[in-house]
Amino acid sequence: MVTVVYCYTIMSLGEKIKVLSGNRRKFFLLRVADMDTKTALKLCGVVRGTYNTWCQNTDFVELYRQRADFANDFKQEAVQLLRRENQLEAVLLEGKILSRMKADLNEPYLPEGSIVRTNLAREVYSKLMSELDAPPPATVLTWEQRIQRIFNPSPEQIEIQGEVIDGQFSETANIEETKYQTCEPPSVNQ
């Protein structure tokens, strides 16, 4: 008797749309999140002619035909992927603003139209400072987690005895063999 076992791997939406990039990817994610075509094209900054050329690409067409199924199964993941891309774009924009502020501050005289004088620069700077000054989150451990840490400490919790030089323990280089004398129990006849 032969038993056949089928193994199915469930792929995420991100893995399925790896062939798409840029505006195509963003447009497709917006469509999976149930946004209408016209609004999705407008948000991506794409004209109708560009969309028509996308429809000639076999990879895009193959995925786009499954859009309704993806919308049923992966709508939440599509929204999360869009948020992640927006967060990345916001961080890159903040980096550009900070570099522009730094360049303006390096000038001997602050230029008249300097970005440093704007509310945007003030907001970016205050956000950056609040994130840098934020205390690390306190972790509250359950009693089970505390016991787990006692019996299975993480490498950071283990203190290493001796100094480490070039990846070797210095105490291992100076190990001396010690000889122990065995003693015999006192005799009863004494």
Image: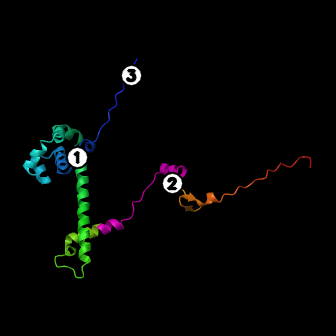
Residue 153 in percent (x, y) is at: 52, 52
Cα gap from disc 1 to disc 3, whole angstroms:
38 Å
Residue 164 in percent (x, y) is at: 55, 61
Q: Residue furthest top?
A: 1
Q: Which residues are magenta?
A: 128-154
Q: Is residue 159 visible?
A: no
Residue 151 magenta: yes
Badge 2: few (under 14), some or many (20 or more) residues near its Cα, within 10 Å? few
Q: Secondary structure at mark 2?
A: loop
At x 23% / y 68%, what residue is drawn? 97
Residue 146 in percent (x, y) is at: 50, 52
Residue 22 in percent (x, y) is at: 19, 51
Q: What is the number of the mark on residue 57?
A: none
At x 34% / y 28%, what residue is drawn? 6
The amino acid marked with disc number 1 is Ala
What residue did someone put label 3 on? 3
